[in-house]
Image: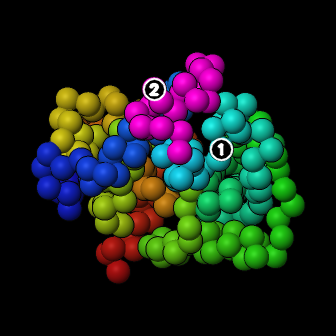
Amino acid sequence: MAGLALPPCSTGMTPKAWQQSWRARRLRDALTKGETVTQAILNAGFPDSGSYYRKADETLGMTAKQFRKGGDNLPVRYALADCALGRCLVAESERGICAILLGDDDAGLIASLHELFPAAQDEPADRPFQQRVRQVIASINARDMPLSLPLDIQGTAFQQQVWQALRTIPCGEIVSYQQIASAIGKPKAVRAVASACGANKLAIVIPCHRVVRGDGALSGYRWVVARKAQLLQREARHEDK
């Protein structure tokens, strides 16, 4: 198995980025528990509400009130298309691509999207968005074509660390959950790393399919283990050429 570019004991984030991600996680937790917006902001560690509102978009990807209501009126549009791995749903928020889901039927993919964004509103896909969807599909089909589009990656501080580490794994290589845990400085958090991989909403772009068990077994995959095997096989063939 390959090593990672991150040095041992690295969090994969700058202290400032880690603090922002930690505050965002605290804020999400507080709002989910029903705290008032003002109280949640202060409990999350912001010195005052003004400090939060200056970075509101970066912190939650929406206003605190919208998040507290489950994303009411948050514009999230999506499109469905065929790809080399079956059907693909690409969703976009105002900040960027927020979900790339793989599956076999449109109804299941749309249901999965609504689980991720339960109260978000779907908008018609205009021509510029359709072009971005084509870029996503081309990136998936080309095996190793980087996706140069804005991404809206939402997760806890720990998930962000894991996902950043995953994005350092070269195409054609695999690493273990243990290696990822060690790379982010939390060698005992193997199960939590596996959980973060399972929470990934951006298939291929965040390559959680390149992480396997210590014995080389494929283990789970949010979009079916058979699809994970297919991805790894085609990446291995690509590297052999």
Q: In this view, does 65 lie to the left or right of 218?
A: right
Pinpoint residue 148: horizontal percent, then vertical percent: 52, 75
Query: Quick one: quadrant of the N terminus?
Result: bottom left
Q: Is residue 90 left or right of residue 46?
A: right
- Is residue 47 highlighted in magenta? yes
**Residue placed under numbered mark 2 in the picture:** 43
**Residue placed under numbered mark 1 in the picture:** 63
> Does residue 59 show up?
no
Pinpoint residue 180: horizontal percent, then vertical percent: 26, 45
Amino acid on which disc 1 is placed: Thr
Pinpoint residue 37: horizontal percent, then vertical percent: 61, 30
Q: Residue at x 53, y 45 (%)?
A: 50
In this view, the residue farthest toward the left is 8
Q: Which residue is drawn at 69% across and 36% down?
A: 65
Q: Is 206 or 107 nearer to us in this picture?
A: 206
Please tell me how crowded label 1 is: few (under 14), some (14-19), or many (20+) other residues with Cα within 10 Å.
some
Please tell me how crowded label 2 is: few (under 14), some (14-19), or many (20+) other residues with Cα within 10 Å.
some
Pinpoint residue 161: horizontal percent, then vertical percent: 33, 47
Q: Which residue is drawn at 20% across and 57% down?
A: 6
Label 1 element class: loop
Amino acid on which disc 2 is placed: Asn
Question: What residue span does the magenta drawing correspond to?
Answer: 31-50
